[in-house]
Amino acid sequence: MHERSERGPAVGPQIIFGFDATGRCTLSTGIGLDLLRVKPGELVGQNLFTVYRDDETSVAALSRVLAGETFTVEREFRGRLLAIYYEPVRNPQDVVIGAIGVTTDVTDQRRVESEARAARQRATLLGDLSTALTREILDSEALLRLAVRAVTEPVADAAVVWLRSPAGRSLAPRARWRREGDRVTVPDRGEHLEPPDLAGLQALVVPQVLETGGDETGLRVPLRSRGLLLGVIDMTRAASRGPVTDHDLDLVTDIADRCALALDNALLLDAQREAHEQLVKFQAMADASDNLVGITDTADRFVYTNPQVRRAGVEIAPDDVVWTAAATYAGDSTAGAIRSGVESTGRWSGDLRIAVPGHEVIAELDAFRLSHPDTGAALGTGWIAKDVTGLRATEDALRAANADLKQFKALVEASPDFIAIAGLDGVVKYVNPAGREIVGLDPDLDVTTTSIVDYLTPEGIAASVEVEQPAVIAHGHWEGESTLRNRNGPPVPVAIASFLMREVETGEPFALATVQRDISERLAAETALRELADQRQALLTRLVDAQEAERTRIAADVHDDPVQALAAVDLRLGLLQRRLRERAPELLESLEPLRASVTGATERLRALLFDLEPPDLHDGLAAALRSAARGIFEDTETRWTVDGAAEPEVPNALRVIAFRIATEALTNARKHADARHVTITVRGRDGGLEVSIADDGGGLGPEPVRSTPGHRGLVNMQDRAAIAGGWCALSTPLSGGTLVTVWLPGPESGPM
C-alpha cells in the first residue's frame, strides 16, 4: 500500500462503505463489488478488524482513520488496483464515531496512464533518434555507433552490429556497445566473434529472441531496408531484467527500422559519392519506394524504372515508348486520356487498371512534366504509380459496411422494441426512439446522463444484480423476463435478451446491449386464457357432475321399476313352466323362447345398471379401470393389464370422462376385436391426461371406421373427448390390432 501519487482523479467502478468506531461494517454497496466477488451488504454487521485480521495493511488503515486521519491510499487486492479514500465521521463533540470510505477500481485507469507514459517516452525517443540519425547521415561509422547504442540501450545490456560485406556474401562485426561504462567500440581484428549464418538470416524480418541459457537472454534484430537485409544486431540481456515483452520488441523494431533506413542511405552515399547528389538521392528514394516509379525523356522513352515496376509484373525495357507501354497494360482509351492530359496541362492524375500476368492491379497514377529548376528546360516526364488495389478494396468494403451500418441503424430506429447500449461502467450510450417511448423518456433527453438502474424497477434492479449481470459476465448473454420503469405510467413487463458487445479483432467486451420487448399484451392474453381455462374446467366439472347425477337417477329408476318388473315376470314364467310341464307339456316349446327373451332383457338391464354406476375413483383412474376390466373380461379368455405408474394429478371430472371413454373401448374390444390381450396405459402428456387401450385383435380393417345405425359407441367416445377440449383417435399399429388413444387437457394446458 502507498499514499496516492500525482495522478489523475480515480475513475472506475466504486464501492461505498462505512463502519462505526468499533470497526463494525454499517454500509457496503456499489457496482465495484462485482469485480471483487463480494455481494452488496455482505459485510454489513461484520467487524472489519476481524474480517481483515490477517491483512496488516487494511487493519492499519482502519486504525488510522478511526484515529481521526483523512487520507487516500492505493493498493492491490485480488488482482485489482484499488484507490481507497478514508474519512472519519465525528459527532457534534468532534469525537470520531466511525468512518466512511470510497473504494475505486483504478486498474484500467492506471494501465491506460502507464501506456500513455510509455507512448510519450517512445515518441520522444524515436524523435530524438530521428534527429540524431539525420545529423550522422553522411558518416556511416558514426551512424553505426549511434545505431548500436540506440537499438540496444532501451532493452538490453550489450550488443554487436553485423553488416554485410561489400560483396554481400558474409557478415562482419562493425560496432559494439556495453551498458557498463557506456562505451561504443570497434571490435578488434584479433577478437574472435562467431558470425551469424547469413543464409539463415534472409527470412528474418522481425526481432528474434534467442535462448542462450544461463543468466542471459539473447535478442537478434534485423536491419532491413528496401526489402534487403543490411545486417543484424545481436544483443544480450540479463535475466534479472525479466523476459522480453511485446512492448520491447515493438520499440526495438521501430528503432531498428529507422536505423536500418538511415544506415542504408549512408551506405548508398558512401558507395556512390561520386555520382550526382540529387540523382543519388532520387534514385535511392525511388528504388526504396513501394510505388512504381519511372522517368521518360523528352522523346517519351523510358530512361529509368524502379524495381517495384518489375516486381509488379510490368515489363519495360530501356528506350520503350511510354504510350506504347500504357496502351499495352491499360488500354488504348486510357493511354489516350493520359497523353491528352499530360500534353495539354503538363499533368494527369487518376486511377487506372493495369493488366499484368495473372491479375489486375489498380494504380493511382501521377504523371507530370519535368523541367530544369534553373533554366526551365524540358527534361522529360515523371511517372509515379501507387498500388491501391488493397486500398480501393478496403474503401469498397468500408462503403458496404457503412451501408450495412445505415441499414442496421434504420432497423434499430424503426424497431418497436426497447433497444439500448451501455458502457461496461453502466452509463447508457444509446436508446432507440421506441425504447424512449416505452419508458417515457423525452425524445431530446441526453441518455448519456443516465445509467442502467434509471430504467429498472426495484424488482428489475434486484433481478439484474442477482441473475442477469452474473449470467452476462459468465456466458456473454442472458435471456429472461423483467420489468422496465415507465416514468409516465405503470411498470412495463418485458422479455429481455442482453449480451456483451465485443471488439472484432481482440474479442474484448466494450459495451452491454439489450433488446427488450413489451409483453403486456401477451401477459394479458395469458391471463385471459387461464381464466377461460378455469371457466372451461368449471363448466366441464358441472357437466360431468350433472351427467353422473342423471345416470345415477336413471339407474335407480331402472332398478326400481323395469328390473323388478322383469324379475317378477321371469318368476311367474318359471311357475307357469312347471305347471305346463305337468299338465300341457306340448306348450313348453312355445314358452321357453319367451322366458329366454325376458331373461336376456333382465341381464341387459343389469349390464346397463353396471354402466350407469358412477366410477369409484377414490384410488385413481388406473384402479377404477382395473375394476372395470375385471368385470368386462370376466368369463372370457382375454388377458388384460393396466399401467398407471405415470398417472398425473388431474381434476376428477377429467378422470370420469376418461373412464367412460376407456370402458367403451374395452367393451368394443370384448365384442368385436377377438383379442387375446388388452393393455391399458394411463400417463401424463403435454400437461394433460392420456389413456391408451391397445389390443392384439383383428384391427380396424381397410375401410374407414364408422358408427353403424343404433350403435354410437365411437361417436360418443370422440364427442366426450371433444367436450373436454381433447381428442380420441383410433389406429392400427404396424404390429396389428387396434389402438385407441384419448387425450384430455389438464388445467394448465390448452385444448388441442
Image (cartoon, rainbow, N blue to C red):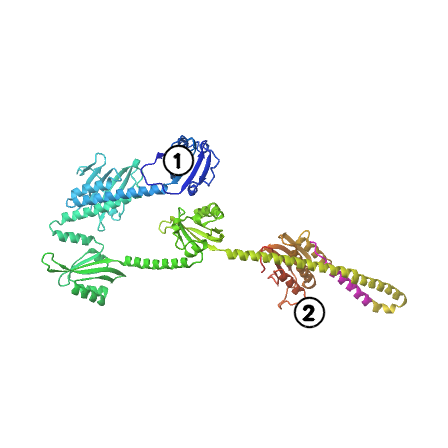
Q: Quadrant of the C terminus?
A: bottom right
| Residue 344 appears left or right of 625 | left
604, 447: nearer the viewer: 447
Q: CA distance from mark 2 to mark 1?
A: 95 Å
Magenta segment: does it hold 517? no
State the extent of the magenta-drawn residues as a range. 592-616
61, 551: nearer the viewer: 61
Q: Position of residue 433 (x, y in %)?
A: 41, 56
Can residue 644 be seen in the rendering of this structure?
Answer: yes
Question: Is residue 228 positioned above or below 696 on the image?
Answer: above
| Residue 401 appears left or right of 257 | right
Label the magenta part by its dominant secondary structure: helix
| Residue 118 appears left or right of 710 | left
Q: Earlier in the sequence, mark 2 or mark 1?
A: 1
Res. 714 image quadrant: bottom right
Circle 2: residue type: Pro
Q: Position of residue 560 (x, y in %)?
A: 79, 60
Circle 1: residue type: Tyr
Q: Position of residue 281 (x, y in %)?
A: 15, 52
> Which residue does the image show at 82% across and 66% down from the upper left?
592
What label sits on residue 709 in the rendered view? Answer: 2
Q: Position of residue 104 (x, y in %)?
A: 39, 40
Magenta segment: does it hold 607? yes
Q: Residue furthest right?
A: 583
595, 319: nearer the viewer: 595
Mark 1 surroundings within 10 Å by alpha-carbon count, few (fewer than 14), some (14 through 19), many (20 or more): many
Q: Quadrant of the N terminus?
A: top left
Residue indicated by mark 1 = 86
